[in-house]
Amino acid sequence: MKRLRHVVRATVASFRVAIMMAVQYRASFVAEAVVSVFWLAWTIVPLFVLFRFQRGVAGWSQDEALVVVGFFITLSGVLDAFVDPNLSAVVQHVRQGTLDYVLLKPIDAQLLVSVHRTAPSKLPHVLAGVIVAVIAAARLPRAPGAADLGAAFLLLGAGTAILYSLWTMVVSLSFKFVRVDNLSYLLRTFVDAGRWPTAFYPVVVRFVLTFIVPVGLMTTYPALALRGALSTSGLALALGVALAFFGAARIAWTLAVRRYASASS
Amino acid sequence: MKALMRALRAMPAMLRVGFAEMVAYRAELVIWILTALTPIIMLLVWDGVAANGPVGGYDRAAFARYFTAGLFVRQLTSSWVVWELNESIRTGTLSPALLKPIHPLAFRAAENVVVLPFRLVVMMPIAVALWLWRPEMGMFIEARALPLCLLSIALAWAMNFLAQTVFGALAFFAEQSLGLFNVWFSLWALLSGYLFPLELLPSWARTIVWYLPFRSMLAVPTEIAAGQLGGAEALLEVGVQAIWVVLFFFAARAMWRAGVRRYEAFGA
Amino acid sequence: MTASNDPVVVVDRLSKVYRVPRKDPGLRGSIGSLFRRRYQEVRAVDGVSLEIRPGERVGFLGPNGAGKTTTLKMLSGLLVPTDGSIEVAGHRPWLREPEFLSQITLVMGQKMQLIWDLPPRETFELNRALFDLDAAECKRTLEELVELLELGPLLDRPVRNLSLGERMKCELAAALLHRPSLLFLDEPTIGLDVRMQVAVRQFIAQWNKQSGATVLLTSHYMADIAALTPRVVVISSGRIVYDGSLETLVDKLAPERRVVVMPLRPLSQEELTAAAPFVLEEGRLVVTVVVQEVKRVVDRALRELPVQDLAIEEPPLEDVIAQLFSSEAEA
């Protein structure tokens, strides 16, 4: 119990410092909000172009697909605000040798590096995504029920966990390939594939995007839940995948730290 | 002029250093290349849409040809000088580079160019895979279109490099310069034909897009390569590209000079 | 229960071996390394054994690349040994158990744990939470540190606005907030001006006395060792070359002294010849002799030469140590 209290205390303190550091940068909310408008356009316009010629694509109507896009924008915002800043910081730590200081603290290093940075200025993206998803969901022929909403939230949480796990695995790679500061762009390319419902892709790719790099799962499944099209087994499957990835991320991190501990000088 | 001659003479050495650096960090390079795979994703989606028949004048073969060509063009025209400039200005490492007899931008250009053959080589297996998947796309480039296509690619490369220089040089003046570049990049992604062939836009949008530079940075060489743009029209578009290159050059030069002056006045 | 004088650090035949990629020169080498990487073995630490008692101040001295930092990192658990055994405060460091980590601290001269954009106070607060320190106790420790290091005016200014020396002082405070029983310092005075170097050394000595913490310091500056650590461990090429007191080392290695005579007036050629073995060097008469001969030579000089001033110089410690390293390299 004392240990748990210690860990909670340490986490809260780290996150508090993360916010203080972010505020120092004077990255203006307004500027980010403007950027997110352009980014919204980039994400939504292709959808409109796509649906210009057909009413439905692979069994998805424009509004249903728009829900997926909304969730995609939301999760991208979460990635930008909470996950990516920590990623860049770890890469920098490894490069500058300051990861040593993290490893010397009596708190799990993975936990520390997951909460020690944040970019609250990216929160407008999250808001924009939620707005898009809500507008699209409102236009659906069938209004989502409470259970649907609950499942959708749960799956968005699972999606966050998947993003976090993917990020952690990629960061673990950075220990070996030290000069990989474009790792975040790599992650983004994969995440980018999640902007479309997985049904739009050929079968093989669909499988990859659901089980191997589950970016499709994290946006499509909550959208399916929202329109009541997701079975309980589907829900269980998605949560299972998220859990598996979380475990894999932990393993990847542990191996990377061990390697760092034996290889660096 | 003398500076240019000096830069040219130093080219082989710069290329060699750039190559050695690139090899030392080959993992990074592969990742950079992987990040340009968005066209493949878009191709998969559009292919699905065109499953039951052509869409806006593009059938599956046409989409395949377009996006495969787009993949190559993207690889051959992209650069990362905006991030390099931003970092070297912010951290002050630009100072020693300014003292060298070679213009730092010439060095960056050499660096960016030397990577191209490697990128081409890495793209080959992907192109082959795509061709095996959609053999109806055929050979997406005809021999007689090649010279114009190469010219168009070179001009697009220059546009990209110079545009990035402008935004990189913004770091002399503003901390948020990368944010501004992200806006530019979003517009580029949307309006350059990166995510969908510009032909698919409604005609009013197509007119607007014609007046913007983004089309010249990707769509023009891609359409020439894919055989969807040819003859006099292609020449016209390449001419437009050349005009944009000139405009961008002057913009980049002005930004750079103003920026360096400010940099040297205020110190690193 | 361990007796209070049991060694707190026990190292036995510790080794650390790296595989480092090797590249052949030139363009061909670049292409070659694209396809096939070649490795070579580097023995950073090669069979190091030592024991340290609680409260001791020990200096690791050696040239760059000797293995000092690697050894220190193994002691603090940052690196896993390739061979041999290592025990610090009853733990195996590389397991990085929380109880172990709470008892040690590492300060690296060129790397900061202070948060750059915030005042040092915020780093202290963070560390307080990370080490789960009791508020009252922590306050007391901080007051002690603030007094010893004169941190008063520095606490609330962003770290980026502090000078290098001020930053170093704050680094030390941040590192000691949890009152560790072991203080590892890796080149702590590097890059500091002389005044600050002295201040840092004085602080470490004072803290060692006040808190009883064991101090392990690596440095390639003789002055750090001479001022701070009565016991010196000389490391060269990954091996311990000497482990003992500094005085004994100097006497053993450099039993020579330079006797320098400033003459009252210029000497004639005959006088110069007669003054042998003294040699004329830039207007002064100089001779180098073993310690045992010093008295005889000085007596003779005072009797026979027109002496205005006479000095007995020890060879610079740096030269002594450098000699030790070069002889090791030849070995």
Image (cartoon, rainbow, N blue to C red):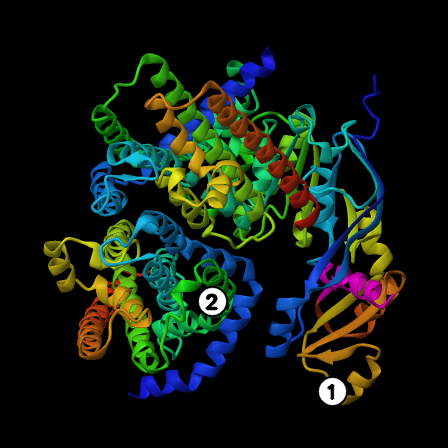
Residue located 41% across and 75% down the image: B110
Q: Is residue C268 above or below residue B137?
A: below
Quadrant for residue C37, please give it: bottom right
User: Which percent across, then down, holds residue A135?
Assistant: 21, 28
* Kind of residue at badge 1: Ser
What secondary structure do most residues of the magenta stretch adopt? Answer: helix
Please, which residue is most extreme toward the front here?
B52
User: Which percent across, then down, holds residue B197?
Assistant: 26, 58
Q: Is residue A118 magenta?
A: no
Instruction: Please rate how many residues cluster around mark 2, counting C-alpha atoms within 10 Å: few if below 14, some from 14 to 19, many from 20.
Output: some
Residue located 53% across and 43% down the image: A171
User: The residue tagged with tag 2: helix, strand or loop?
Assistant: helix
Q: Is residue A49 above or below residue C208?
A: below
* Kind of residue at badge 2: Arg
**Mark 2 highlights which residue?**
B119
User: Which percent across, then down, holds residue C178?
Assistant: 59, 25
Please, which residue is most extreme toward the top here?
A1
Front one among A140 and A219 = A140
Q: Is residue C319 magenta?
A: yes
Say which quadrant the N terminus of chain C sits in.
top right
Instruction: Please rate how many residues cluster around mark 1, counting C-alpha atoms within 10 Å: few if below 14, some from 14 to 19, many from 20.
Output: few
Q: Which residues are magenta?
A: C310-331
**Mark 1 highlights which residue?**
C268
